[in-house]
């Protein structure tokens, strides 16, 4: 076949759909990624980019639609953020794609015989998120509030994102009106001018409580009393309003300084029978109901006897460890965010859980931190089980080496990234561990992300 040419249109059979929402096909031997196409489609696509090993096409026409394609895609008023990779397909097919993605990650990691179970799901695909951080651009009279478009710093309006609670959109509309009324300028990252960088919203189950944080390129919100009166008068669910100060030239959303302007500085929710409070800086799963499925599955595969010491690494506000405290002798948690550790210890007290304690530190330096915990508790600690829930980059090899050297009998590993999970499971498999069936859990419907849990058990010393 002749070499393909940019700006030419080609007919392509779409064989796969990746987690970024691109249909994957071929022209000859060259892989072509087509935005908006679905596996099973036959399409006409215009080539807009040619690289050494692949090309990118723009969907021009669907010649024959895939059987997986919805007659009408899930509605999305934003359209430009690219977050909902799977909004055009049936949800059952999305779950199968996510299961296949986990299995593929394990095959690439050298574990082709790994058994991946069907994806657990609440079946709720809209309004499930309890957290959103919206960048703000534009002008005081015409602010653009939403999310960044793919591979850009251009904000696309997403006040009515269907993954967020409807209440969030109503609050954003009210904030937009207040910006115009009081002349509050959005942040301009190029010139580092303007005040309002992000609007940060978190909610408890069913939006019973909502925490609102303004991320500012400054130390104060002008006319804050008027803002508070207006917003609390309109939205009784608001339980706290605060600011975060971020003057840095950075892509990091929040700075280190938080101030409560009104109400509570923390949110309260219940998860797996445990009442939890957490601050804006603390990690908490964005899909509460699906998180319950995940934590219950983790507890089930751990199969605790009741006499174990559980070491909860990357513990956050203690949500997982505290949900398992009734099944073990003792829980010791380690987390790098001091405010989350404070919340975790307070959550233990709040729930009358007296067999759990949490400490601040980097989980990669577990040996030193364990010594610190031993000093604080006044006794030696010999963990019988470890709970891992790291960020997307997975675990530092130093941590995995430490766990293997200690011959920890059980490791329950929860991950939001199948690739790094498979890598770390393969690493531990070479150091004396076997692993159970792998269970994906869909905490992020319509997006390309999936959570996964697996039990690693010591099989040799």
Image: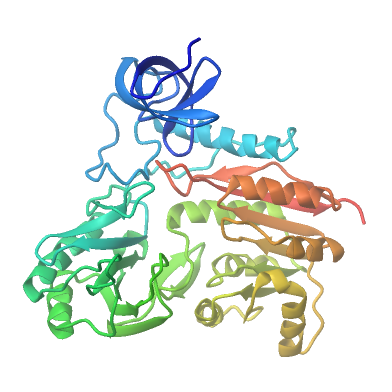
Colouring method of the image:
rainbow
Quarter of image, res 42: top left
Residue at far top of view: 1
Q: Position of residue 19 (x, y in %)?
A: 48, 38
Q: Quadrant of residue 71?
A: top left
Is residue 358 toward the left or the right of residue 443 in the image?
Answer: right
Depth check: give the residue in front, 391 or 25: 25
Viewport quadrant of the C terminus? bottom right
- 63 relative position to 285: left or right: left
Position of 379 compared to 272: left or right? right
Residue 207 picture location, percent across and down: 30, 63
Q: Does 109 sit above or below residue 139?
A: above
Residue 92 visible: no
Q: Nearer the viewer, residue 37 or 189?
A: 189
In-front residue for pair 299/49: 49
Instruction: Please name the residue shown 22% across and 73% down the image.
Output: 194
Closer-to-camera residue (161/34): 34
- The x and y percentages for residue 87 are 35, 36
Residue 210 seen from this side: yes
Tally of numbered discs = 0
Q: Is residue 156 above or below residue 229?
A: above
Query: Residue visible at 29% across and 76% down?
Result: 217
7 in relation to 18, above or below: above
Q: Residue 119: x percent and y percent?
A: 54, 39
Which residue ends up furthest to the left in the rendered image? 181
């Amino acid at each position: 076949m002749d070499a393909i040419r940019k700006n030419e249109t080609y007919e392509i059979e779409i064989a796969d759909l990746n987690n970024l929402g691109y249909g994957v096909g071929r022209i000859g031997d060259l892989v072509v990624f087509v935005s908006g196409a679905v596996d099973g489609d036959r399409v006409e696509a215009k080539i807009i980019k040619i690289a050494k090993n692949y090309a990118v096409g723009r969907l021009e026409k669907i010649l024959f639609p895939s059987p997986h394609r919805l007659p009408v895609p899930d509605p999305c008023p934003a359209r430009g953020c690219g977050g909902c990779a799977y909004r055009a397909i049936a949800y059952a097919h999305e779950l199968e794609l996510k299961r296949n993605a986990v299995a593929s990650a394990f095959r690439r990691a050298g574990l082709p015989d790994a058994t991946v179970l069907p994806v657990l799901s609440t079946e709720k695909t809209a309004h499930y998120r309890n957290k959103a951080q919206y960048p703000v651009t534009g002008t005081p009279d015409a602010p653009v509030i939403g999310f960044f478009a793919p591979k850009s710093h251009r904000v696309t309006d997403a006040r009515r994102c269907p993954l967020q609670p409807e209440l969030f959109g109503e609050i954003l509309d009210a904030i937009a009106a207040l910006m115009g009324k009081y002349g509050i300028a959005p942040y301009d990252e190029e010139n580092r001018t303007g005040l309002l960088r992000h609007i940060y919203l978190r909610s408890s189950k069913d939006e019973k409580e909502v925490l609102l944080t303004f991320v500012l390129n400054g130390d104060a919100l002008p006319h804050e009393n008027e803002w508070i009166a207006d917003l609390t008068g309109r939205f009784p669910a608001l339980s706290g309003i605060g600011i975060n100060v971020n003057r840095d030239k950075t892509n990091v959303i929040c700075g280190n300084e938080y101030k409560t302007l009104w109400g509570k500085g923390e949110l309260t929710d219940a998860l797996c029978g445990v009442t939890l409070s957490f601050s804006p800086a603390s990690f908490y799963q964005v899909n509460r109901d699906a998180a319950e499925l995940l934590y219950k599955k983790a507890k089930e595969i751990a199969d605790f006897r009741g006499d174990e010491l559980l070491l909860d690494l990357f513990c956050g506000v203690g949500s997982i460890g505290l949900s398992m405290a009734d099944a073990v002798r003792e829980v010791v948690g380690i987390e790098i965010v001091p405010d989350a550790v404070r919340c975790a210890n307070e959550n233990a007290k709040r729930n009358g859980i007296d067999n759990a304690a949490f400490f601040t530190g980097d989980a990669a330096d577990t040996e030193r931190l364990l010594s610190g915990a031993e000093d604080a508790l006044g006794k030696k600690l010999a963990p019988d089980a470890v709970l891992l829930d790291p960020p997307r980059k997975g675990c530092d090899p130093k941590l995995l080496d430490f766990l293997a050297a200690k011959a920890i009998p059980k490791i329950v590993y929860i991950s939001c990234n199948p690739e790094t999970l498979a890598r770390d499971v393969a690493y531990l498999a070479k150091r004396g561990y076997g692993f159970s069936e792998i269970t994906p859990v869909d905490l992020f419907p319509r997006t390309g992300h999936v959570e996964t849990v697996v039990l690693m058990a010591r099989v040799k010393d």
